[in-house]
Structures are given as C-alpha cells and as structure tokens.
Image (spheres, grey):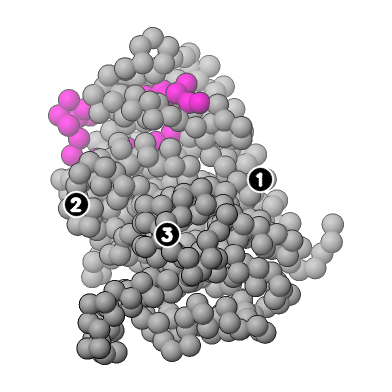
C-alpha cells in the first residue's frame, strides 16, 4: 500500500518498507540487483530532502505569515534547494528525466557544499543505456507516492527502513555485500563491548555504509545519554559506499558527523593538523586480507603506523590493526575490530608484529565468533579488543572467549540473538560465563604462557587444551580456507575486468 502524495498521515513501518522495496524492484532487469543501492538510495534521499523542505516551509508560513521573507526562510531549512531543483521539478520532466536529475543533484551539492557534497554518489543518471527512461520514471513514481517528512514518517522509522534496504541489498549482492554491510547483530555486539559514552570521539576507518557509527548513536540513546554530543568520524574508499554512509546518518537523525572519502592507508583523512586524529573509540570491520594495500610506504609512514613492523604486501590485516591502535587516545582509547582467525597465528612478518603488539600490552581480548555470520565470507572470524590502559587485573594478560556456539541458525547466515550478545558481552566485561557448561569457553591467559606458544593466539591452544599437532592442523585448515577465498576473489575480479574489456568466456 502507498499513500497519495497529497494524503497526510503516518505510514506504518510495513507500508514504508514495502514501498521502498517496490522502488528497488522498479529497476529489476536493466540494473543488476547488486547495484540497486547506487540508484535507490540517492533518489530516496532526494525525496526526503524535498519533502523536509516543504515541511519546514509550512512551519515557517504558520509562524511568520505575511512577514515571511526569503531571507528569513533561508535560515530555517536544513538544506537549501535552488530554484528548479525540487522533487516536483524532476518528476514533472517527462523527457530526458535522467539528465534533469543529474543537473539537479549537481546543483544541490554545489548549493550545500558543507553538508551534501558527495552524498548522491556518482551514478550517470543521463545514461539511458544503463538506466532506461521507463525504469527511472518507475523508480521516481514509486517514491512520488509517499511523503518522507516528519509529519508522515518519524526519524526512527526512516532509519529502520534504510537498514531494511541495506539488508535486502546485501542479500542481493552476495559476496560483494561485505564491501558495505556488516550484519547488525555483529555491529551491536562490537559497540556493546566498547561501550561508547556521550561525549566521546568515535572513528571507523573502514566505515562502509556507516552501520558502526549509527549503532553507536543508538546505543548511547538507549542508555539515556545525549547522543548529539558524540563526535562521529569515518573514512571509506568507495565513493558510492561513502555516500550511502552519509545518507544513513542523516536519515537516522544525525546531523553533525564527518565522513571522508579516501584510502585510509595511503591518504588518511581523519587528521589533526599534520598528525592523525586520536579517538576514544575506534571500531571497524575492515576488508579481510586486502591486497596491494600500500606496504611499500608503510615502513616510512609519516604517522608512525608501521612502528610494530610492515605486514605482507598481499595481506593488510595487521595494517588495519596498526592503524587503529595508532589512533587510540592515550588513557581512554580502545579498539574493537573484526578479523579473520589467520590474523591470530600466521607466521612471518605478521608473527613479528603480533609479538610486538602483545609485548606492548595492548591486546585485551580475543573473542571467537560463530561461523557463517557474514555475507562475504564463511571463514572463522574473531573480535580483537585493544586498550591503551587495560584494567589492572588484565595487565600483561589476554582474555580468550570461545563464543562459536552462541548463535541461531538462519536460512542463509547464522545470527546472534540478543541473549547471545548479552552473554558474550558479560563474559568480556566480567570474565564470567552466564551460559554454564558447554556454552562459552573463556580464560584469562598470562603473557608468559602466550610467549611459550611463540605468541600464537589460536584460541584452541588456550581453551581446548589442543596438542601442538592438533592446533597446527586447525591453523592449516583455516589458512587453506582463507587462501581459497582470496583466490576466488581474485578470479572474480579478473572475470569482471575481462568482461568489461569485451571478452566473452
């Protein structure tokens, strides 16, 4: 069901989500489902901006009446809409609508450089080969049937609907989903563990669609804190994904944030003068086993991120960790990062970095998560928690938690329930297993014991009393699975490039 554009009244959550999914399906055929997000989100956001401008205008007329002037009204709008750049101007264009939409988006970004620059992504709206006129009009007409202002849709509903679309697009994107979407139950657990406070600074150096930052706001609000005092920062290399992150935060009611686009390793944007900015909370689910990440410049990194060593050129996992622990604030700084299990035991340069970080007493916890939680990978993963100042009882120790059995089986991916998350969080914070026998495994291990294992962090060595041979076999199997995934990703990239070059195979 959709409401006519002249009909007021609140939409239900189901009505809103149904309308949004109908909008996505309007693209089915000419647009690959994995690319729906690049088209649907900018149109949705444009409609939201226009509807909110109309809503703010109605309030201004009610307040000022005949005394309302353009100069007075200008200061009452969140976003400025130039003449000819309203939703009505685009929907009323019957021919070359994509060209008109592209022009309008460009002018909106130019008119609002501080807030809308880069928000709409880089879709070539005027390219009718990629997006036929009929498909674009179907997309626009679906959104034309709803009002997205506060009078019809409250902020929480709109934010939830945006999350709904992100999940649906992740389902449609398969392996590519990992580039922009982390399952929300994983995000919820990670944020709960780090426990952000209202006045703290938060950074996600691989922010994707902004889910970690949004969940931080949600957590602070749920605890009764003032979320508007949070200082949110993110960096994302992909233009479309960074635009989605900005829209995500706006549609969740967050107005003050900094999402920068760029390569976190080669061109970090979150800086304080000539140095990297430091944060209370650093949180991320970065791309695993990133190749060609910038190892050639890491040893001489001007920000000192390579102080523990240079990770392999074909695997940037420890580069992410080094970057994140570098930008922790002294005293309050803490890091939560999702990593593949190979990070815990791989040899060579990674082993030397791992030893140096452990000797620096920064790693607080290793939490092994259930399998098959993510769209983009089936390999075992863990949450690693680092702190600048660990609690006294954990000084020169590491807490190992085996949470692999805490999940609910799903159709495509497993999920962690609220109860699972609560039990894992309590185990981390109190060193206590609420689950009793057979649920969680946990143990606080002295650095001396880890050193005797050559700084290998394979959780089986500390919780399952595995023999060296058994642990080595497990590590070999995990390394094999990781290598298979890297190979499959490389083959997929090659296939895309060959297809783009016109090769048919």
Residue at point 29%, 74% (across, down): 59
User: Residue beneath label 2, please?
Assistant: 226
- Of pointers 2 and 3, the one earlier in the residue sequence: 3
Residue at point 57%, 30% (across, down): 410
Q: Quadrant for the N terminus, please.
A: bottom right
| Image mark for residue 9 | 3
* Residue 489 is covered by the magenta coloring: no
Left or right placement of residue 338 versus residue 62 in this view = right
| Image mark for residue 487 | 1
Left or right placement of residue 237 versus residue 256 in this view = right
Residue 242, given in percent of the width and then of the height, sits at: 45, 63
Q: Which residues are magenta?
A: 382-408
Q: CA distance from mark 3 to mark 1?
A: 53 Å
Residue 78 is drawn in which quadrant? bottom left
Count the numbered circles shown: 3
* Residue 389 is covered by the magenta coloring: yes
Which dot, 1 or 2, sits closer to the camera?
2
Name the foreground residue: 41 vs 262: 41
Q: Is residue 352 visible?
A: no
Residue 81 is drawn in which quadrant? bottom left
Provide the secondary structure element on which disc 3 rests: loop
Q: CA distance from mark 2 to mark 3?
A: 29 Å
């Amino acid at each position: 069901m959709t409401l006519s554009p002249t009909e007021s009244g609140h939409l239900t959550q189901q009505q809103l989500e149904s309308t949004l999914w109908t909008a996505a399906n309007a693209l089915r055929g000419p647009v690959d489902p994995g690319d729906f997000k690049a088209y649907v989100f900018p149109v949705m956001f444009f409609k939201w901006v226009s509807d909110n401008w109309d809503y703010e205008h109605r309030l201004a007329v009610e307040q000022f009446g005949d005394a309302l002037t353009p100069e007075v009204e200008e200061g009452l709008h969140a976003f400025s809409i130039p003449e000819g750049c309203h939703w009505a101007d685009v929907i009323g264009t019957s021919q070359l609508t994509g060209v008109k939409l592209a022009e309008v988006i460009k002018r909106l970004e130019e008119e609002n450089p501080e807030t809308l620059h880069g928000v709409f992504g880089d879709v070539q709206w005027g390219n009718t080969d990629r997006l036929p006129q009929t498909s674009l009009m179907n997309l626009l007409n679906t959104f034309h049937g709803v009002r997205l202002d506060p009078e019809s849709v409250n902020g929480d509903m709109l934010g939830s609907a945006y999350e709904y679309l992100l999940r649906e697009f992740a389902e449609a994107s398969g392996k590519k989903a990992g580039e922009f979407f982390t399952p929300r139950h994983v995000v919820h657990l990670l944020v709960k563990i780090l426990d952000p406070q209202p006045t703290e600074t938060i950074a996600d150096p691989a922010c994707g669609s902004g889910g970690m930052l949004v969940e931080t706001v949600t957590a602070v609000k749920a605890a009764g804190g003032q979320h508007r005092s949070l200082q949110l920062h993110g960096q994302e290399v992909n233009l479309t994904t960074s635009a989605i992150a900005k829209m995500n935060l706006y549609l969740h009611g967050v107005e003050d944030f900094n999402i920068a686009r760029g390569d976190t390793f080669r061109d970090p944007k979150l800086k304080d003068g000539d140095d990297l900015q430091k944060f209370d909370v650093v949180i991320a689910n970065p791309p695993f086993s990133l190749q060609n990440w910038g190892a050639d410049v890491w040893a001489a990194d001007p920000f000192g991120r390579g102080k523990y060593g240079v990770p392999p050129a074909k695997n940037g996992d420890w580069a992410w960790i080094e970057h994140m622990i570098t930008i922790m604030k002294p005293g309050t700084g803490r890091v939560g990062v999702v990593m593949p299990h190979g990070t815990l035991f791989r040899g060579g340069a990674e082993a030397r970095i791992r030893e140096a970080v452990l000797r620096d007493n920064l790693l607080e916890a290793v939490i092994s998560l259930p399998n098959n939680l993510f769209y983009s990978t089936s390999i075992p993963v863990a949450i690693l928690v680092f702190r600048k100042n660990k609690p006294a009882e954990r000084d020169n120790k590491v807490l190992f938690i085996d949470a692999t059995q805490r999940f609910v089986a799903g159709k495509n991916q497993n999920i962690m329930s609220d109860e699972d998350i609560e039990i894992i969080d309590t185990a981390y914070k109190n060193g206590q297993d609420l689950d009793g026998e057979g649920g969680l495994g946990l143990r606080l291990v002295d650095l001396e014991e880890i050193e005797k294992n050559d700084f290998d962090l394979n959780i089986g060595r500390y919780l399952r009393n595995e023999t060296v041979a058994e642990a080595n076999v497990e590590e070999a199997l995990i390394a094999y699975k990781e290598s298979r995934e890297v190979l499959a990703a490389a083959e997929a990239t090659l296939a895309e490039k060959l297809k783009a070059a016109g090769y048919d195979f």
